[in-house]
Amino acid sequence: MTKEHANWSPYDNNGGTCVAIAGADYCVIAADTRMSTGYSILTRDYSKICKLADKSFMASSGFQADVKALQKVLSSRHLIYQHQHNKQMSCPAMAQLLSNTLYYKRFFPYYAFNVLGGLDSEGKGCVFTYDAVGSYERVGYSAQGSGATLITPFLDNQLKSPSPLLLPAKDAVTPLSEAEAVDLVKTCFSSATERDIYTGDSVEIIILNANGVRRETEQLRRD
């Protein structure tokens, strides 16, 4: 008699889509609020955006239990950093910390696909995009999650980020104004919602600039 093994996995994919766009003096981070498993919607009002520091926000899709664990690790390490240095981490420093944290778990990874957005020390928008094991890159815009394959070609067409191979290197920021970037993000999500069953309900948008942080929401399809 052959022994049967349960088809069990420590991971799940709860779907969802995240987008970030960096501008000359702003950063826009957005994510939808639907959390699913298989063909079931678990909740229609789940925020996938986490504030890591005053000028650093992370949006994450994938397995939300792993995302929560990752957020707790980053929060505790940031608290230690603040006690030691008497200041908050800059966004590029937080990007390196996130990379190190993901790489440390590379043999049993956090099943989380992150995009980190914020403002650097010069006040410029910055976006960092990641894979599950910590490889990262500073870019002008990025999309992660179940709708990323639909949104990324659209952003490529609209924004045409300069190649990182060009010399001299160009800033990885987009030429759009803040209002245009927010409108573009809303367009991205409304079109992705039409084709991706794991993206929908509403989109949460965080806008960072020199004046502080602003939050907007926009309704999407609920079916």
Image: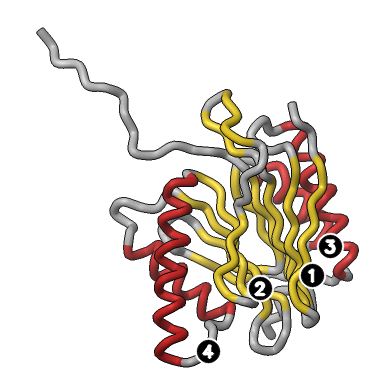
Q: Which residue is mark 1?
A: 174
Mark 4, Cα crowd under 10 Å, few <14 / some 14-19 / many 20+, is few
Three-letter amino acid code at the position of disc 2: Gly
* Inter-mark Cα distance, 1 to 2: 14 Å
Kindly check if marks 3 and 1 are in contact, taking CB atoms under 8 A apart as contact: yes
Closer mark to the observer between disc 3 and disc 2: 2
Q: Which residue is mark 4?
A: 87
Tell me the element at label 1. loop
Closer mark to the observer between disc 2 and disc 4: 4
Dot 3 or dot 1: first in sequence order is: 1
Tell me the element at label 4. loop
- Left or right of 105: which side holds 96? right
Q: Which residue is mark 2?
A: 118
Mark 2, Cα crowd under 10 Å, few <14 / some 14-19 / many 20+, is many
- Left or right of 83: which side holds 190? right
Closer mark to the observer between disc 1 and disc 2: 2
**Residue sitting at x 86%, y 69%:** 178
Q: Residue furthest top?
A: 1
Tell me the element at label 2. strand
Mark 1, Cα crowd under 10 Å, few <14 / some 14-19 / many 20+, is many
> In the rendering, at what x and y percent does residue 18 appear?
65, 52
Three-letter amino acid code at the position of disc 4: Lys
